Image (cartoon, rainbow, N blue to C red):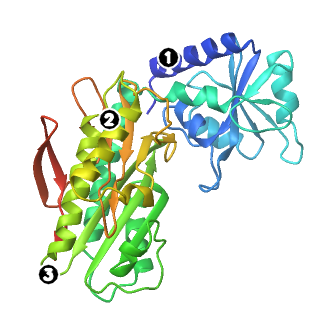
């Protein structure tokens, strides 16, 4: 599922950076960057590691996949890296050749790397922005990831019953994700009081009684979608309704003000104003508000001092919280307004207008 024009475009970006930094080559070891340069390819064995088991080396006139003899057959045949224009160079698994081979192929030691490795310069902060403005092909893949993730979490939510363990719910969500080849970076289920007690409620043996929250950062083709959904048994209590609706409103304010060409901190400040208007001025201090997303769970979290500018076709996942409530979905920032990539599939929705833009957001599912 690769497009050669997409790969060529990204290699041009890499070589432009290489020229600016005066390097002979750039070595990409991170899973996120391997996926970016291969239209969603996987260089991983363990999903919980930042680095993969195969690297990409880009030089001024060639590009290579470097890996040991264990990984070379799969990367060539299943990830199709040779069809993409990457020459595979491998070594016996019991040798440590990556650093020296990269230097041989680049013709010198002036090589940058996307993470700390050996004695190479870490230029990860220079590489990351290359990924932020997504291509049209990536946007199409992202829409599919958003739909599949929203469907998985919402289908799982409908199966929750009083007495279910949080960890059992997470197990069912994991199964629903993996059926479509989605893995997860982060996954939460919180029952009742744990929703308000912790901003990051890792699933436990606690049992659901009256309500549950499900959150996930799911990944496919390297692209990560972040979203949250709520279930309530019976009618939603008035106080929870007030907090949830306020969280959704703040989220929409953040989305509406995430505009290409504008400093992202402008959206952040508008969000803080919305918290205050709703009577929850200090709630933002209890949890980060989210930020840019894509091939990382968050490329950066937005704070009052963030100096980044929103890019065209850049993905964001804001996640405003008010104790006991949260609103979170993944959007694409475009010149025509925010496009919600993880919009509700089967959940009830709330319609509202914020900053002159119409929104339809997932509501709490009453069971």
Tell me residue 362's x, y (percent). Answer: 19, 57
Seen at 83% across and 46% down, the residue is 93
Tell me residue 3's x, y (percent). Answer: 44, 24
Q: Which mark is residue 9?
A: 1
Seen at 62% across and 48% down, the residue is 44
Cα separation, mark 2 vs mark 3, equals: 34 Å
Cα separation, mark 2 vs mark 1, equals: 20 Å
Q: Which mark is residue 117?
A: none
Tags 2 and 3 in contact by the CB under 8 Å rule?
A: no
Closer to the chain start, of discs 2 and 3, is 3
Q: Is residue 127 left or right of residue 233?
A: right
Number of the front mark, 2 or 1: 2
Q: Which residue is mark 3?
A: 234
Question: Helix, strand, or loop for circle 1?
Answer: helix
Q: Is residue 5 above or below residue 365?
A: above
Q: Which residue is mark 2?
A: 332
- Report the number of numbered marks: 3
Number of the front mark, 1 or 3: 3
């Amino acid at each position: 599922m690769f497009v050669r024009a997409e790969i060529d475009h990204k290699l041009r970006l890499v070589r432009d950076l290489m020229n600016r930094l005066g390097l002979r080559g750039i070595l990409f070891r991170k899973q996120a960057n391997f996926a970016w340069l291969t239209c969603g390819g996987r260089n991983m064995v363990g999903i919980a590691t930042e680095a993969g088991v195969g690297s990409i080396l880009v030089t001024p006139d060639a590009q290579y996949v470097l890996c040991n003899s264990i990984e070379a057959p799969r990367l060539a045949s299943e990830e199709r890296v040779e069809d993409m224009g990457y020459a595979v160079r491998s070594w016996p698994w019991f040798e440590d050749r990556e650093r020296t081979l990269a230097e041989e192929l680049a013709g010198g030691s002036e090589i940058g790397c996307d993470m700390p490795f050996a004695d190479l310069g870490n230029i990860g902060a220079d590489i990351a922005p290359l990924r932020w403005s997504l291509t049209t092909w990536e946007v199409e893949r992202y829409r599919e990831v958003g739909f599949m993730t929203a469907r998985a979490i919402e289908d799982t939510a409908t199966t929750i019953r009083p007495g279910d363990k949080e960890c059992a719910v997470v197990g069912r969500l994991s199964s629903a994700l993996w059926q479509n080849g989605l893995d997860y970076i982060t996954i939460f289920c919180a029952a009742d009081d744990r929703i308000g007690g912790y901003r990051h409620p890792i699933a436990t043996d606690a049992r659901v009684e009256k309500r549950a929250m499900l959150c996930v950062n799911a990944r496919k083709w390297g692209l990560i979608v972040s979203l949250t959904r709520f279930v309530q048994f019976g009618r939603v209590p008035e106080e929870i309704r007030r907090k949830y609706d306020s969280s959704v409103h703040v989220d929409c304010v953040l989305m509406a003000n995430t505009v290409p060409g504008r400093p992202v901190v402008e959206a952040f400040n508008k969000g803080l104003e919305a918290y205050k208007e709703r009577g929850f001025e200090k709630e933002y201090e209890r949890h980060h508000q989210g930020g840019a997303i894509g091939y990382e769970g968050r490329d950066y979290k937005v704070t009052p001092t963030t100096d980044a500018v929103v890019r065209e076709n850049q993905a964001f996942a804001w996640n405003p919280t008010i104790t006991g409530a949260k609103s979170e979905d993944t959007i694409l920032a475009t010149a025509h307004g925010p496009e919600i990539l993880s919009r509700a599939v089967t959940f009830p929705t709330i319609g509202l207008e914020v900053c002159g833009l119409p929104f339809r957001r997932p509501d709490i599912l009453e069971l």
